[in-house]
Image: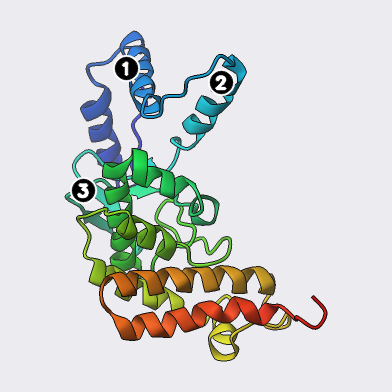
Amino acid sequence: KVGISAVSMKGARNNLESELSDCDFAMLKLGAEKAWTTALSKVEVESDDQDKKTIFYSALYHTMIAPNLFSDADGKYRGMDLQVHESDHEIYTVFSLWDTFRATHPLYTIIEQDKTKDFLKTFMKQYDDGGILPIWELSANYTGCMIGYHGVSVLADAQAKGIVGLDWQKALTAMKHSANQTHLGLEAYRTKGFMEVQDEPESVSKVLEYAYDDWCIAQLAWNLGDTSTYQEFIQRAQSYKNMFNPSVG
């Protein structure tokens, strides 16, 4: 049996005693089988082709191995400021958002709505504790890995799908804050509407992804009735057009 904690040795011991003290190996194995059966049964596939079903459920399993629960059994967690905080909801980690914003998080809004609420609340805790929404968060660290600021698209998608329980006005403020940074080519993108290769590596991909994220901010602003923010970001979202030269195709 192993107990881990990002907070303290005491937290690790408490997690061990809270979660595993009454379990033996056989009980844990049976519990894992039941938990995975319940989770994977959220989507039922009917087919006579066993290989296709195996492929599908393997893929569905892969969507469920992260994000990981990060807060301790007593609600304490280590924040993006690396200080210990306490939460009344579960805090998660490993938000590899460039990998997951397109399909995985939209899937969660359908089959993992309760967890989605905690994911979004975790984003906002990360904003509160660390000062910015995550790009690729790992164990209470801003890795700065990958491109775009796709926490905004996950938030906008969830709001459009009717996920409740979040302060959406505050979320919009956090999203605009991410969009108005100067790092990772954003200064050139904001001032010129595009990036040249000497401004920033991966300039074309970054412009395309920033433009998409700006479109997401515009959609949330529209849904909240914030027309001035909508106009600002729907215009910025057109920046992708600046990467195409119609005279040469």
Percent x, y of residue 108: 38, 44
Q: Is mark 2 on a helix, strand or loop?
A: helix
The relative height of residue 74 versus residue 190 in the rendered view (above or below) is above
Dot 2 amino acid type: Thr
Verify CB contact (< 8 Å) between mark 2 and mark 3: no
Disc 1 packing (10 Å; few <14; some 14–19; many ≥20): few
Q: Which of 112 and 246 is in front in this view?
A: 246
Q: Name the residue under label 1.
A: 31
Q: In 3D space, how far apart are the residues under numbered discs 1 and 2 (Cα atoms)?
A: 22 Å
Looking at the image, tell me whether mark 1 or mark 2 is earlier in sequence order. Answer: 1
The relative height of residue 89 versus residue 189 in the rendered view (above or below) is above
Verify CB contact (< 8 Å) between mark 3 and mark 1: no
Q: On the rendered structure, is 38 left or right of 106?
A: left
Q: In 3D space, how far apart are the residues under numbered discs 3 and 1 (Cα atoms)?
A: 23 Å
Q: Name the residue under label 2.
A: 54
Q: Is mark 1 on a helix, strand or loop?
A: helix
Disc 3 packing (10 Å; few <14; some 14–19; many ≥20): some
Residue visible at 68% across and 78% down in the picture: 243
Q: Nearer the viewer, mark 2 or mark 3?
A: 2
Q: Name the residue under label 3.
A: 89
Q: In 3D space, how far apart are the residues under numbered discs 2 and 3 (Cα atoms)?
A: 34 Å
For the C terminus, the image quarter is: bottom right
Looking at the image, tell me whether mark 2 or mark 3 is earlier in sequence order. Answer: 2
The relative height of residue 28 versus residue 65 in the rendered view (above or below) is above
Disc 2 packing (10 Å; few <14; some 14–19; many ≥20): few
Q: Nearer the viewer, residue 206 or 249?
A: 249
